[in-house]
Amino acid sequence: MDKIVSLCRRRGFVFPSSEIYGGLGSTYDYGHYGVLLKAAIRNLWLRTMVQERDDIVALDSAVILNPRVWEASGHVAGFSDPLVDCRTCKLRFRADRLDDAQCGKKPSKRPGEHSECDLTEARQFNLMFQTQVGAMEDASSSAYLRPETAQGIFINFKNVLQLARRKPPFGIAQVGKTFRNEITPGNFLFRVREFEQMEMEFFVPPGEAEQWYRYWIDQRLEWYRDLGLRDANLRVREHSAEERSHYSSGTSDIEYLYPIGWQELEGVANRGDFDLTQHTGASGTKLEYIDPEGERYTPHVIEPAVSIERIFVALLCDAYHEEVVGERDRTVLRLHPKIAPVKAAILPLIPRDEGMATRARSLYEELRRVHVVEHDDSGQIGRRYRRQDEIGTPWAFTADEQTLEDETVTVRDRDSLEQERIPLAGVRAWLDEALERPWTPAAD
Ligand code: GAP
């Protein structure tokens, strides 16, 4: 994980937030390549969920909702983790994760195991961030930043049913910021307090819930394989009945083998009719479906839910390689081309040569209208290739001496390091086609 964090910082993917003020624990800002990588993840998710399907529509609900939403959903009463304080070192720990924590005294042991540890009894700590709406600061103005995007979907069920003219089975997909006052954030972006969730609530006839639950587990697992994550680093783990959330009648985690061990990447839950029933009861608005024969029912819900941050870390861990090429070290991110922040680099071999510089520049102008590409004319060519390897750019097109003679350029492949020549005029079509080609991660 340290190497990933260091690469992210060095190449401007991610840096600690508020750094000039000493930072704010486990809060991060995204730089240029981080923004591009997040956008690629988000776009691919929306494309798979919404663009390529007839049965899912998009939604963008507010971050701050009527606080009654969170009472009905069970978050006010139950969205909490057990917390213990140490009276000696003043640190706070999750009571159910003491085995993974370290106390603040040296030599560092598990909380409670050092002779000076003095832990309080466990108490429940609600993870929702509270805020005030408007100028008045009293109980009536109190609200929450949403701890999941899902509830914004449930409260819009009727709108979508009527206005988008859908009938079960159909889904509503949403991507947006989510906030949780985690007791122990950490492991880089893996557990943060502000993150971007991608959730899809799929509404189905009650009798079909189990079948759709299995369907979505398979679909989502396949999506990660298509993204290039290695099979050996992916698995599905079904929750036991004791482990499941209050609303769930079945939950499976798609887990990834992060450097910190097997951890939840995405959750797929069968939420039954819990949410629509709760909001019907609390709001008085019937959230149900009436079929053409006049039969009413409350649809059951299957939910695949993930954060961009968990995918971001998994992709970087899977793609990160250090190797020696021609006696020189190279760090390379072997990202799937469709997820790489920059799709191609355009390089004049000798930047001061006007013929090469002009051709490289005009190729760049042509390609950037359709793809995220980068023009680089500073430093030796080898160093420019290395810079692109480190950010995972799959191909580099170089204009060289031969370009001036026959209007061809070289294409360098990031993974095989092979080079071929193609006509300058055919680069756009070559790149379009290459981005659609099947891709598999290289063996270690
Ligand atoms: N609507 C269901 C729900 O929110 P969850 O398991 O609490 O379920 C869903 O969260 C997903 O959100 C997780 O699988 C994970 O990908 C991501 N996630 C949860 N907490 C996170 C955190 N503190 N930092 C980054 N991602 C988080």
Image (spheres, grey):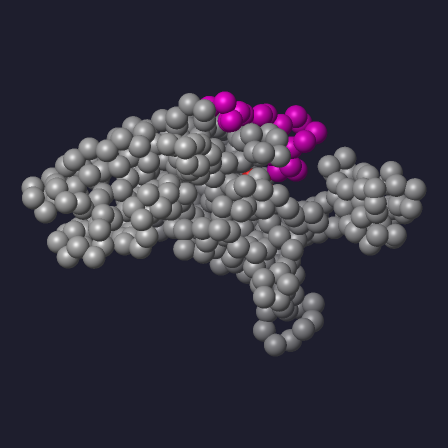
The N terminus: image quadrant: top right
Q: Where are the magenta residues, as a range?
A: 231-251
Q: Residue at x 22, y 38 (%)?
A: 411
Residue 410 image offset from top left, x and y in percent: 19, 39
User: Which residue is drawn at the image coordinates 17% and 45% (left, top)?
Assistant: 400
For residue 176, above or below residue 343 = below
The picture places residue 7, in percent across and down from the top left corner, at: 49, 46
- The picture quadrant for ligand 1 comes to top right
Residue 172 in view (yes/no)? no
Position of the C terminus, as image quadrant, is top left
Locate residue 149, reporting x and y percent: 52, 49
Q: Residue sitting at 49 percent across and 58 percent down? A: 62
Of residues 207 and 313, the one nearer the viewer is: 313
**Magenta span has 246?**
yes
Above or below, comparing residue 298 to residue 75 in the picture:
above
Closest to the observer, 155 or 286:
155
404 horizontally vs 76: left or right? left
Look at 61% across and 57% down and name the residue there. 68
Residue farthest toward the right in the current orientation of the protein: 115
Task: Answer left or right for 38 relative to 234.
Answer: left
User: Quick one: which residue is furthest to the front in this view?
Assistant: 327
Q: Is 295 displayed left or right of 272 in the figure?
A: left
Left or right of 360? Residue 271 is right
Compare residues 135 and 317 and report the one nearer the observer.
317
Residue 326 visible (yes or no):
yes
Extreme residue in the bottom direction: 135
**Residue 405 vs residue 197, the one in the foreground:** 405
Q: Does the magenta stretch include residue 193?
A: no
Q: Where is residue 329 in the image (x, y as percent from the top left)?
A: 44, 36
